[in-house]
Amino acid sequence: EGDGEDEAAAGAEAAAEAARLSALLAALPLLPQHRSVTLHMAIRYNLRAGNYGITSACVDVLLSKALAKGLSREHAAQLRAVRASCERRAFTNGASVLAACWRCGRPTTVTASECSSC
């Protein structure tokens, strides 16, 4: 019985790490077509991890004029529905949105390159 709980905890940790890493990847300055792919990945993983604030921010970037021109109407409607779902959840984020600053080790959000103290 303990093994199942350990596996569930490991799965939750893996999902949280995938969400954190995909959000960091989506925040990199990439070519529009690559940024679109990383944003979709970040939306998928952060939605699964319960990071509705980060998911919504990624949706907003995808729906911005720079990237939205390549989206079909159906896909844009799906993204708006995801954003509405995030809004119903008050844009809350799980604990996985915090990571150690690469300079000082203090907790910072996953999309920040460094903390506000540095």
Image (cartoon, rainbow, N blue to C red):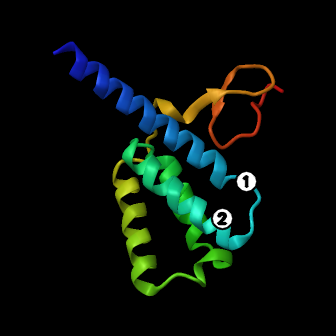
Between residue 54 and residue 20, name the one nearer to us: 20
Categorize mark 1 by other alpha carbons within 10 Å: few (<14), some (14-19), many (20+).
few
Q: Can residue 94 be seen in this view?
A: no
* Residue at the spot 40% in from the left edge and 55% down from the top edge: 87
Q: In which quarter of the image is residue 106?
A: top right
Disc 2 and disc 1: Cα gap in Å?
8 Å
User: Pointer 2 and pointer 1: residues touching (CB < 8 Å)?
Assistant: yes
Task: Report the quarter where the N terminus lies.
Answer: top left
> To which residue does mark 1 refer?
28
**Residue 98 image position (x, y, % from top left):** 58, 30
Residue ranking furthest to the front = 3
> To which residue does mark 2 refer?
35
* Residue at the spot 60% in from the left edge and 68% down from the top edge: 36
Between residue 108 and residue 44, name the one nearer to us: 44
**Residue 16 image position (x, y, % from top left):** 46, 36
**Residue 66 image position (x, y, % from top left):** 68, 77
**Residue 31 image position (x, y, % from top left):** 74, 69
* Residue at the spot 42% in from the left edge and 38% down from the top edge: 15
Check disc 2 and give the amino acid type. Answer: Arg
The answer to whether 24 is drawn above or below residue 2 in the figure is below
Picture disc at residue 113 = none
Check disc 1 and give the amino acid type. Answer: Leu
State the SS at label 1: loop
Task: Report the quarter where the C terminus lies.
Answer: top right
State the SS at label 2: helix
* Residue at the spot 66% in from the left edge and 73% down from the top edge: 33
**Could you tell me how many numbered marks the image carries?**
2
